[in-house]
Amino acid sequence: MTKKHPVLCLAILGLCATPAAAKDRMTVNPDAVNTETILHTWSWNFPEIARSMKEIKDAGFTMIQTSPVQRSYAPEGSGKKLFDEKVAEGNWYYYYQPTDWKVGNAYLGSRDQMKQMMDSAAKYGIKVIVDVLPNHTAFDTDAVAEEFYKAVGGREKMFHSNGLSPISNYQDRTQCTLQGVGGLPDVNTENPDFQKYYMEFVNDLLSLGVRGFRYDTAKHIGVHSDPVDKAAGVKENDFWDVATGRKAVKGVRLALPEDSLCIYGEVLQDKNVKEKEYEEYIDQTASAYGHELRQALENGKADIAALSDWHHPADPSHLVTWVESHDTYANAHESAHLTDDMVRQGWVWLTAREKGTPLFFSRPAGRTPEKYWGNNRIGARGNDEFFHPEVVAANKFRRGMAGQPEQIGTLDDGTVLYVARGSKGLALINISQKPQKIKMETALPDGTYTDSVHGLTFKVKKGVLTGKLTPTSSALIF
């Protein structure tokens, strides 16, 4: 029998689990099905996202993640370029510097434009996740809105007692949670007046149709076992209880049940990070796993032991996975040199797998390994990789394999990765620069299979699959 189906390459980021009960995230259902995929529409403005919603839907993504939508630091002349060495026409990190918790900024657009984008998302059945940043304000504290200061009880109540001092040791939890990350002023997230003001913003987003949040610098917001800033009048580190709706603050509570939302945090892994305690509240980023995957893609050869281990103490159903994030691309440039082919291969690997929620970072339009800012326009749509046939095929494969157990491995010298999903599907990924002959045992029924992206043919006879992969390409076999 002949079966036609897609191929693909590449990878990116992960998924958000929706546990049965918000207060019992540690009991994991092994039969839970996750077919979600996130497209990170980084730096796209609201009109561009709205115009692209049908393509996003057709590409097989189920969620999008926007950049921060709150009012942000916007000096005169900014808002034009992703990066400007002279800082005359702005920089992408300005919209990661809140000045008030109100919807609309100079980078993504107005509140009305966000409403139009949300209407488009609803029309095509796409969930929207918003990047939020309660941990800090803008560098320029004079740029912060007076209304914001007044709402939290004045300037002296906005920050932790040592919040204007930058962190010098990121493995020291006192510094990590009570001082400024990257020098940004560290907000007193335990101040009830701040919590109330912030949660009113969150509930406003929910009223617009938002159904998830990505918490920037989440590991810098303390959990209960972390040091308490008594000098700032803090009695307990309860921000996460409030943010996830477990408790109200001054009559305000998360408007929707936490388990109906996708909530995850940027908890970058390092020594002394309390991943298990964060897991009780939110899903987390699998940053160490992303690093391992990028190394394999760069080497053109994988150690399956390194890729079998999620390198995280949390259950993989509570992890967001990626090949790269906006930080690894735009901040540290750690991943900017990877070719688009490499990224697609990583995406196929992550998306074909049973666990994790993969996130695909949309790189700037016109980018090359040497010119990673590409056309260098804030608000512009990213490049066309999000609807590359291999990415589309991987997204469809993920949905088609719902409920099928995974078996992963490598062939021969590690140049070919595979993800087998029961007896229903198989993803083959050649991460090398050379063609590779394939011969492996499989649970797929005997027959001839053709992938729809590259037209590659594979035969299964008596439980053995044979075929050939072209360099840096993948095949998805149903």
Image (tube, rainbow, N blue to C red):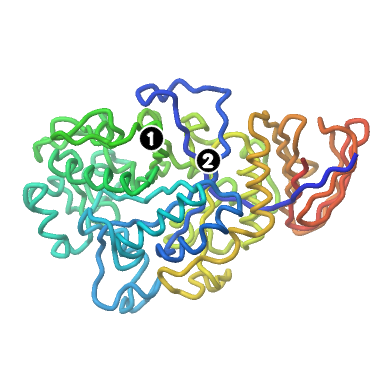
> Which of these two is toward me, 53 or 453?
53
Image quarter hosting the C terminus = top right
User: What residue is rendered at 44% in x and 24% in y?
Assistant: 20
Q: Is residue 63 left or right of residue 198?
A: right
Q: Residues within 10 Å of mark 2 (few under 14, many from 20)?
A: many
Residue 38, compared with residue 314, is above or below; it is below
The reply to whether residue 322 is in sight is no
Q: Which mark is residue 328?
A: none
The reply to whether residue 197 is in sight is yes
Indicate the position of residue 295 as horizontal and vertical percent values.
60, 51
The residue wearing badge 2 is: 357
User: What residue is rendered at 30% in x and 47% in y?
Assistant: 169
Residue 83, compared with residue 455, is above or below; it is below
Q: Is residue 437 left or right of residue 36?
A: right
Q: Secondary structure at mark 2?
A: strand
Q: Residues within 10 Å of mark 1 (few under 14, many from 20)?
A: many
Indicate the position of residue 414 as horizontal and vertical percent values.
74, 44
Mark found first going from the N terminus, 2 or 1: 1
User: What residue is rendered at 93% in x and 31% in y?
Assistant: 462
Indicate the position of residue 443 as horizontal and vertical percent values.
81, 30
Q: Label 1 sits on what residue type?
A: Ile
Indicate the position of residue 203 as horizontal and vertical percent values.
27, 43
The residue wearing badge 1 is: 282
Q: Secondary structure at mark 1?
A: loop
